[in-house]
Amino acid sequence: MTTPDFTLSRDAYGQLVLHAKNGDAHKGVTPVRAFPIAAPNEGIALVNFEGHEVGWIDHLADLPADLGLLLEEELASREFVPEIETITEVSSFACPSVWQVATNRGAAQLILKGEEDIRRLSQSQLMIADTHGIQFLIRDIGTLDRHSRKLLDRFL
């Protein structure tokens, strides 16, 4: 476990405050993942309200437990990227189409405007944007069931 050169706390308004070893305090700090999909627990910048980086974390797991928990809570409150686990139904193989999916956050419906809204992040990862701007992640195509892969293949 590595001790960072700063501490974090919440102020009376619930905002993060970074206290540097040199005595500087930065209010309204926001954690930002450098690689939110590929390496979500590595490379986290702490950015002040002006957009300037005031702290850096190499690995979330290296932090003391209380500091790691505080950062994870803050990140979870800002990020919403449901992971598709199953594609149960697709209204049409022509776009726009309505998809019924099961995600790690429950059942959802998304509207795929066009095939260009499916972006390949890697050989096995996809990001799907629906018409409302919500980004859905398929972390590994290989873990999808056969029916889901068959429906997805029609759009790839």
Image: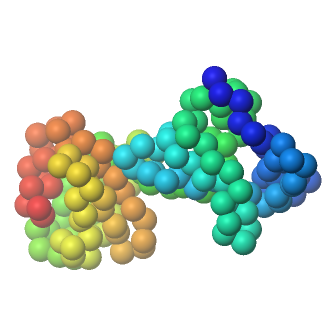
> What percent of the width, then of the height, locates residue 37?
39, 49
Q: How is the image coloured?
A: rainbow
Q: Residue at x 58, y 36 (%)?
A: 60
Placement of the C terminus among the 4 image quadrants: bottom left
> Which residue is more in the foreground, 130 or 116?
116
> Which residue is more in the foreground, 44 or 5?
5
- Tell which residue pokes out farthest to the front in this image: 22
Placement of the N terminus among the 4 image quadrants: top right
Q: Is residue 12 above or below residue 21?
A: below
Direction from residue 55 to residue 99 in the image, left or right: left
Q: Residue at x 86, y 47 (%)?
A: 22
Q: Is residue 16 above or below residue 71?
A: below
Could you tell me if residue 30 is visible in this image? no
Direction from residue 82 to residue 61 in the image, left or right: right
Direction from residue 6 to residue 137 in the image, left or right: left
> What percent of the width, then of the height, locates residue 63?
65, 31
Q: Residue at x 47, y 44 (%)?
A: 40
Could you tell me if residue 131 is visible in this image? yes
> What percent of the width, then of the height, locates residue 59?
54, 36
Q: Residue at x 15, y 55 (%)?
A: 152
Task: Find residue 109 and report its image quarter.
Answer: bottom left
Direction from residue 58 to residue 132 in the image, left or right: left
> What percent of the width, then of the height, locates residue 77?
63, 52
